[in-house]
Image (cartoon, rainbow, N blue to C red):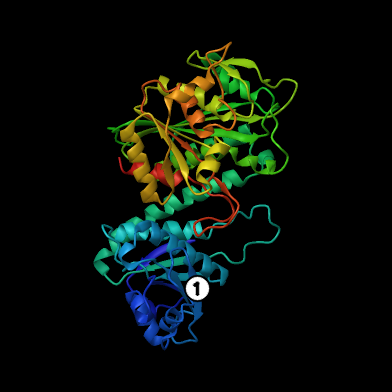
Amino acid sequence: MTFTVETKKPAEYPCEALLVGVYEGEKGAGGLSKEAQTLDKILGGTLSRALSAEEFKGKPGTATAFHTQGRIPAQAAVVVGLGKKDKLTLPVLRMASAAGMAKARALGAKKVAVALMDEAVRGAGAGDKAQVIVEGGLLGTYRFLKYKSEKDKKAIEEVVLLLTKPAERGKAQAGTAKGEIIGEAVNFARDLVSEPAASLTPTLLAEEARKVAREAGLKIKVMEKAEVEKLGMGAFLGVSLGSDQPPKFIVLSYEPERGGARRKIALVGKGLTFDSGGISLKPAGGMETMKCDMAGSAAVLATMRALGKLKPRVSVLGLVAATENMPSGRATKPGDVVRAMNGKTIEVVNTDAEGRLTLADALCYAVKEKVDEAIDIATLTGACVVALGKVQMGVFANDEGLRRRVMDAAKRAGEGAWHLPLNEDLKEAMKSDIADMKNTGKAGEAGATMGGLFLQEFVGSTPWVHLDIAGPAFIDRETPLSPKGATGVGVRTFLYYLMGI
């Protein structure tokens, strides 16, 4: 899919689908955007009649289509909901673009024109609007079809953003380029998460990381088991013992071309390429989705891939402790004790609480590298799904300033995030009789917070945020911005955060 910007009148532009906007809660022509009103006149009032009859209400994330009967060069008008006129935001515009592009794709359109650039969004310029429109187009039309026998016959090939103000073209083109980088990064993460576990072992994930490094001009180091042992990463290695697949510790490094990095940040992604639960075996129902337990690592790799093009003025370490969690005669057993890189001993009372063990050592490594702040992202707890469902990331932090900045980035990126507490009183439940701590607390009580409290033990005084993406990483119903399955959540939050520094 290619994206370009042109200064042409939408009603005169030849294409197979033309996207225009409609506002919610307004009757007749009053609910139409400026370009939609022009189009409505040419089409004999088709759009305003549909609004008056309440056939289409203009809610965010909705879209419908009308055939133009040859009255304009566009074969079809795709009308997208923009919500309340006085509440149009960039996230809503992103969602409108996604819904509209998906509708155009369903119509079989190859060339799509977008007449949304003139919509008024408070505090947003042409570049901002172009960026989110392009992001939405890439996210809304994504499909993972690698293992389908039939080829994709409905892929959109060309998207043109239409401007009426020639002076804004340069900013719109810059925003378009940025939106492409971000949208493609999210879809790359989706591709990784969608791969079957047999096709994305820790070794193959490390190979993907090497490709990312080559494409983005990053430094990379992949540590094998012997080197990981020398570092003292006993918690990470304890998880890997039951698998025939060797573990890999992946370190990607991005530095600004001209130096002068404002901060050094570690992004730490959970890299369980398959999680059976180990000896504490998961139920069979739904276990096939446990290929998604590396969604955190996919978000980190995708972010690092985009940094080489976006070039923010910040130093970034991308860290992934990649392994499988499998049951075997060699596997860690409930009651075993492992020692993390910082010397803390952990009684493993539940081998299905394994992600926090791998993250513990990865966070210790980040601290050793003297980063200014660390952000980890993980499909960590089912408890977070219970608390927040499939639409929000759970956010835990030991630093209020960092938490606010990350959550602000998530809001601008259009990714749901909710702050949850790190209640110190709950630590009592993780006390062990034979080790420094257990790897989980009492079943059924504050499970998401327990995961955060556990990880906090391995960051010391380093400012840190933990994103629990167990809910939104892999969804069971389609949304305007994502099909069923892998969502690539966290990538946009990371990139918006790093670009804003």
Q: Is residue 364 visible?
A: yes
Pick whichever, 1 or 485, lies toward us. Answer: 485
Pick whichever, 352 or 448, lies toward us. Answer: 448
Toward the top, the furthest residue is 434
10 w.r.t. 418: above or below: below
Q: Is residue 176 visible?
A: no
448 w.r.t. 5: above or below: above
149 w.r.t. 238: above or below: below
- Look at mark 1 in the image and give the residue it sits on: 64
Q: In percent of the image, x 41 and y 59: which residue is there?
A: 94
- For residue 424, which quarter of the picture? top left
Q: In percent of the image, x 69 and y 22: which residue is there?
A: 331
Q: Is residue 368 left or right of residue 404?
A: right
Q: In percent of the image, x 43 and y 54: which residue is there?
A: 180
Q: In percent of the image, x 53 and y 45: which residue is there?
A: 189
Toward the left, the furthest residue is 167
